[in-house]
Image (cartoon, helix red, strand yellow):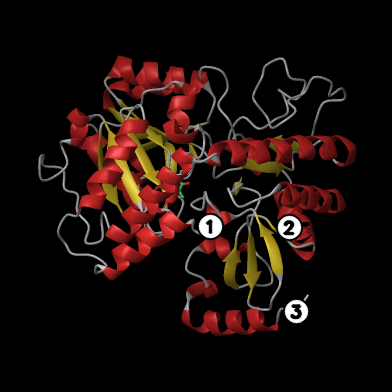
Amino acid sequence: MHEENSRNLYDRALSVMPGGVNSAVRAAIEPYPFFVQRGDGGHVVDVDGNRYIDWVMGLGPLLLGHDLPQPVQSAVQTHASNGPMFGAPTEIEVEHAEFVTRHVPGVEMLRFVNSGTEATVSAVRLARAYTGRDKIVVMQGSYHGANDSTLVEGEGNHLHPSSPGIPDDFAEHTIAVPFNDHEAAHHVFEEHGDDIAGVLVEPILANYGIVTPTDEYHETLADLCDDHGSLLVFDEVITGFRVGGLQCAQGKFGIDPDLTTFGKIIGGGFPVGAIGGKAEILRHFTPSGDVFQAGTFSGHPVTMAAGLETLKFAAENDVYDHVDDLGDQLRRGLTELCADYAPEYTVTGTDSMFKVIFTREGPEDRSGQCKAGCKQRPDCPRYDYCPKDGGDVSDAETDRWRRIFWPKMREQGVFLSQNQFESQFVSHAHTEADVEETLEAYKEAL
Ligand SMILES: *Cc1c(COP(=O)(O)O)cnc(C)c1O
């Protein structure tokens, strides 16, 4: 495999960008990442001409793959040639917001921003302002972007910032509980209920190995929030318009959150974020309310055009059937391979997301186990072994995954996400042949 061009680029990059990258996870590949030259359907080609089946898909945004369908492409071009942005409103923002509010059950109003990080920062500010309380409950191992309020480590309310540069006092207002732990959630509300502005939760832990909720977990959170006057904030930056199709994960799980954050897919491959929710809460944002929120690029016409046309394309074509079906084939194939080659590993994911977690233990008798990704069924023989929260995922063989397994997949022309924790995504451009080739590669590498 040639890699001179990537090596040379990384050498240059190290001199001018910290770690040679603009987002940390890209440098997780050792000794250096490959640099992409272009995408092609469900594949990427690097600067040395190596071609990979791409299951990273921009780390989530690219529902349709790398080739924008004609309506998306022409909308992007039209809006770019009209002049990129104006600092004044445009029609396309209204259309996009109308589309999202029409399809997502918990969303009556929307404020667009430029990243998922911005969305969670603004949602936390809004929840605090609306309730007049400071404390935010998050899940251990969840990810809400580069948000000072949620970059915390530790347990319960003995937290400290997980990065230097964040004052210790910030962590005082954040409480972390293990995902899927009903008792811990009850306990935290018993102790701090009157001070909790909101619970910020990914409907599925999607940045930490893919952990699906156990039965009734979100109902427990919703009830606790209801009883204590706290807001339930669903972070659907990854799951939005990926899990559950156009109704998002909240529709699939039948939960009606007060606020929802979006990002990734709703920008059609361009930088985006959004805070949605009940109109009565959203109206507290400036200028209709007094909670400050603003952005030069927010509602960028090119992004809005790409996002809206992507979602319309998904609504009018068999996009979700296709990606969910291939996701199912991958998870089923991987479950069979793991049974033969690595019975202790757990296949996770749902809809068009998939991952193999290198868990260290599994059941002796696997008959009746989930066939297409862990569903957290109490009667599954894996139930006691499959990850329930972030701690279980970090106890897996993460070094083996990254240092041994990932390079072996790359050698075979399969691009997987850069570490054990990030999800992998099926796009509309992927084919059954891509699935078969990928399963062959897993067979070699497991
Ligand atoms: C990606 C992600 C974010 C951060 O979004 P950025 O656009 O990278 O700032 C926040 N929350 C979740 C659940 C995400 O997956």
Residue ID for mark 2: 406
The residue sitting at 75% across, 25% down in the picture is 382
Give yes or no for contact between labels 1 and 2 (Cβ–Cβ under 8 Å): no
Q: Nearer the viewer, residue 396 or 93?
A: 93
Which percent across, then down, holds residue 428?
58, 48
Asked if residue 44 shows in the view, the reply is yes
Residue ID for mark 1: 58
Residue ID for mark 3: 2
Is 60 left, or right, of 225 in this rendering? right
Q: CA distance from mark 3 to mark 2?
A: 17 Å
Residue farthest right in this picture: 340
Q: Amino acid at mark 1?
A: Gly
Q: Nearer the viewer, residue 175 or 202?
A: 202
Q: Amino acid at mark 3?
A: His
Q: Quadrant of residue 302?
A: bottom left
Question: Badge 1: few (under 14), some or many (20 or more) residues near its Cα, within 10 Å?
Answer: some
Asked if residue 144 shows in the view, the reply is no
Q: Secondary structure at mark 3?
A: loop
